Image (tube, coloured by chain):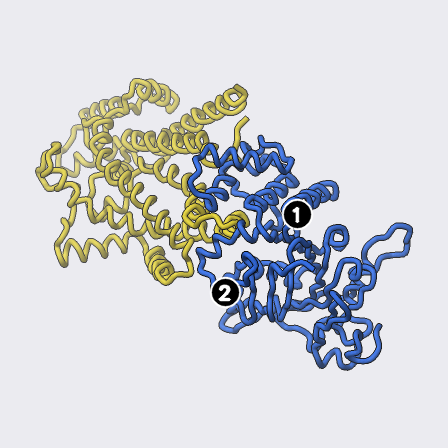
């Protein structure tokens, strides 16, 4: 098994909002333990509003008010040694960005500065991490980097609005790979792109991963994309990981009722029966249901589901699930 | 080339048309108002106690009408007006007779330009720098304090604020003069003594304009920066580990300045109409005062003279903004 590259322990990050004098707590990431390894694609899936983006912010060490680290730890394994992220100075964090952990934003439409040429954006990114280079050397480095990734170097002379949405997303991915980071975090990189462009964007991400042999944490609600590229998948529901396993097991033998719903909603060749979606809508993260947060929408809910929160238990190697139906926590499996 | 044909030429035609229309309206408005300058002049003469024979009065009326360019129909007056305008002749003032309008305007203009160009430049620069920093560091204590101060200062009515300054600094503690643009009898020369005298007189008007104008610029810029700070491209640059001074300058301020540049140009265009309330409160001899007196006295020629400058100022400022804007915002292109 590969070594650990990023680990969280009981991670809790809440948005603490002050609404007209009353405090509202949005439990966006609620007790998450992740163990992400080198040279793997880890997919995080779940409905909108389940805390995926917040989890990524925490992993990228970008916790800013109103988001707060309430409890738990995030460890970066820089050169094999664990580093507690909360102990790092802002400047130390800044240096790790792009060098150790890079970020591909959701909706690249507005992710690039609209008033400067891409060449300038490239220069800002390079010169913030590499010192002692002349302007010409930096631009040459940008050109070489762009060419290696199979993108036309003339886009460096363009402004962001002159590029298509797919090209802009590719540029943000290219920028993320600039300093050959150990981890690339991608937040819904294919959202708002049509399927053909989606394929190109995913392909670029995969090419980079193959070349750098690094880790990609991919967040998307598109289960089809997950199935194609992820090595392991974590299913997120209401701020918690409810099931985690290798992609084969998640798609071949899902245990959690929520996972089953997600997978059943995927179209399949030859199967013409109508697709079923998850009934109901996601719970408010301010006011979570008691016990298992999924029980109001779950067709198999039992008495205990509304009373106690199920722990994430290990079924067998690399398959964890948090459900009362599973693993002898309460008798038989579903 | 398509730029010249498809954008520049139509834009210049529009520029000329707007000026023509503006000047025409300016020509018409004083003639619609019930002020008759000739009759007012006669009234003034009679008020001074001179008794006029009916025959003499008719002669005076005829002469005045001719001199003021009020002979014939409006159309005749209009043609004569444009003829004089192209010769750069704005006629004589009715009420500071026989001083030429040109002379009155060029006497007042340096005062107004001196005061307003400096204060506009200072207000814009300081307001944007402080507002920009306060917006970027909006969670810091000093930013909140500045915000609270601006919140109190900005809604103060300008004339009350100006009077307060005058009362405190010119009447109670007497650091600055009560009125005027320079000491009485001072002769305008390029000597240090005269410049010092002018600066001393213009300090209070300048401070009043800078503080209230600066509060507005500060608040606008702070809001703009706070909005841009939440934009994806700023967040993305931060997550890419771009150095903070680059993010502040090239990502946040650079984008937030776009609307402020337009605001500056429009503000500069309005300078030619003067700053009326400032000039009244501080007895400052600028264009605003001149225009005000011209309106009260029905001094057609003077009103037209000042307004023509103002029309040129504003339309030219807008033209310059339109033509140079693509330099600041690459998303705007004229093809």
The residue lying toward the viewer, choosing from B14 and A57, is A57
State which chain is coloured yellow.
B
Q: Is residue A215 left or right of residue B324?
A: right
Residue at the spot of label 2: A86
Please report the residue visible at 77 percent of the width from the left and 76 percent of the height from the top.
A324
Question: Can you give x and y, in whole percent of width and height, for residue B148 in the image?
Answer: 36, 61
Against A93, is B19 above or below? Answer: above
Mark 1 against mark 2, which lies toward the viewer?
1
The residue lying toward the viewer, choosing from B334 and B19, is B334
Disc 1, SS: helix
The residue lying toward the viewer, choosing from A24 and A139, is A139
Please report, as a chain letter, where disc 2 is located.
A
Q: Colour of chain A?
A: blue
State the separation of the CA atoms marked 1 and 2: 27 Å
Please report the residue visible at 80 percent of the width from the left and 78 percent of the height from the top.
A328
Toward which corner of the image does residue B306 lie, by quadrant?
A: top left
Q: Residue A209 shows which numbered tag?
A: 1
Residues indicated by labels 1 and 2 sit on the same polypeptide chain = yes
Mark 2, Cα crowd under 10 Å, few <14 / some 14-19 / many 20+, is some
């Amino acid at each position: 098994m590969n070594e650990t590259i990023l680990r969280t322990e009981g991670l809790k990050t809440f948005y603490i909002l002050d609404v007209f004098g009353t405090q509202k707590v949005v439990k966006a990431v609620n007790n998450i333990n992740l163990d992400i390894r080198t040279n793997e694609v880890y997919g995080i899936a779940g409905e909108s509003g389940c805390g995926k983006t917040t989890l990524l912010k925490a992993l990228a060490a970008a916790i800013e008010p109103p988001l707060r680290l309430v409890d738990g730890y995030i460890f970066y394994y820089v050169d094999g040694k664990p580093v507690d992220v909360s102990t790092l100075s802002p400047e130390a964090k800044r240096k790790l960005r792009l060098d150790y952990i890079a970020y591909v934003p959701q909706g690249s439409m507005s992710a690039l500065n609209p008033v400067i040429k891409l060449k300038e954006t490239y220069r800002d990114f390079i010169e913030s991490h590499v010192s002692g280079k002349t302007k010409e050397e930096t631009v040459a480095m940008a050109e070489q980097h762009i060419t290696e990734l199979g993108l036309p170097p003339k886009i460096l002379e363009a402004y962001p609005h002159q590029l298509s949405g797919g090209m802009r997303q590719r540029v943000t991915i290219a920028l993320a790979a600039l300093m050959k980071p150990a981890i690339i975090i991608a937040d819904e990189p294919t959202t708002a792109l049509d399927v053909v462009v989606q394929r190109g964007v995913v392909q670029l991400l995969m090419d980079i991963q193959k070349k750098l042999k690094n880790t990609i944490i991919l967040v998307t609600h598109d289960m089809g994309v997950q199935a194609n590229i992820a090595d392991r998948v974590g299913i997120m529901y209401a701020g918690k990981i409810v099931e985690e396993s290798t992609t084969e097991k998640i798609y071949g033998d899902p245990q959690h009722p929520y996972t089953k719903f997600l997978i059943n909603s995927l179209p399949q060749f030859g199967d013409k029966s109508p697709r079923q979606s998850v009934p109901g809508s996601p719970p408010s993260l301010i006011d979570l249901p008691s016990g298992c947060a999924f029980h109001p929408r779950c067709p198999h809910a039992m008495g205990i589901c509304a009373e106690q929160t199920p722990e994430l238990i290990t079924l067998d190697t690399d398959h964890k699930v948090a459900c009362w139906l599973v693993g002898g926590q309460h008798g038989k499996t579903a | 080339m398509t730029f010249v044909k498809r954008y520049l030429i139509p834009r210049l035609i529009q520029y000329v048309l707007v000026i023509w229309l503006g000047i025409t309206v300016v020509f018409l408005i004083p003639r619609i108002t019930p002020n008759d300058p000739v009759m007012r002049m006669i009234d003034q003469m009679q008020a001074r106690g001179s008794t006029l024979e009916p025959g003499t009065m008719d002669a005076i009326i005829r002469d005045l009408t001719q001199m003021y360019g009020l002979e014939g129909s409006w159309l005749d007056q209009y043609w004569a007006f444009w003829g004089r305008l192209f010769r750069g002749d704005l006629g004589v003032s009715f009420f500071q007779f026989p001083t030429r309008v040109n002379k009155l305007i060029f006497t007042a203009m340096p005062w107004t330009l001196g005061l307003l160009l400096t204060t506009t430049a200072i207000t814009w620069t300081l307001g944007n720098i402080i507002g920009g920093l306060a917006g970027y560091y909006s969670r810091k204590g000093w930013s909140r304090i500045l915000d609270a101060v601006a919140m109190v200062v900005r809604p103060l009515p300008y004339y009350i604020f100006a009077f307060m300054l005058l009362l405190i600094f010119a009447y109670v503690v007497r650091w600055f003069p009560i009125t005027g643009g320079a000491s009485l009898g001072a002769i305008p020369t390029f000597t240090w003594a005269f410049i010092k005298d002018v600066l001393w007189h213009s300090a209070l008007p300048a401070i009043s304009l800078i503080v209230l104008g600066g509060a507005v610029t500060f608040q606008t810029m702070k809001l703009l920066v706070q909005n841009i700070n939440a934009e994806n491209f700023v967040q993305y640059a931060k997550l890419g580990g771009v150095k903070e001074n680059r993010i502040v300058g090239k990502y946040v301020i650079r984008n937030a300045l776009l609307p402020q540049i337009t605001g500056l140009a429009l503000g500069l265009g309005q300078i030619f109409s003067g700053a009326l309330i400032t000039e009244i409160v501080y007895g400052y001899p600028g264009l605003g005062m001149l225009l005000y007196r011209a309106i009260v006295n029905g001094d057609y020629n003077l009103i037209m003279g000042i307004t023509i400058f103002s029309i040129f100022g504003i339309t030219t400022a807008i033209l310059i903004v339109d033509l140079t804007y693509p330099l600041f915002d690459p998303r705007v292109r004229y093809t």
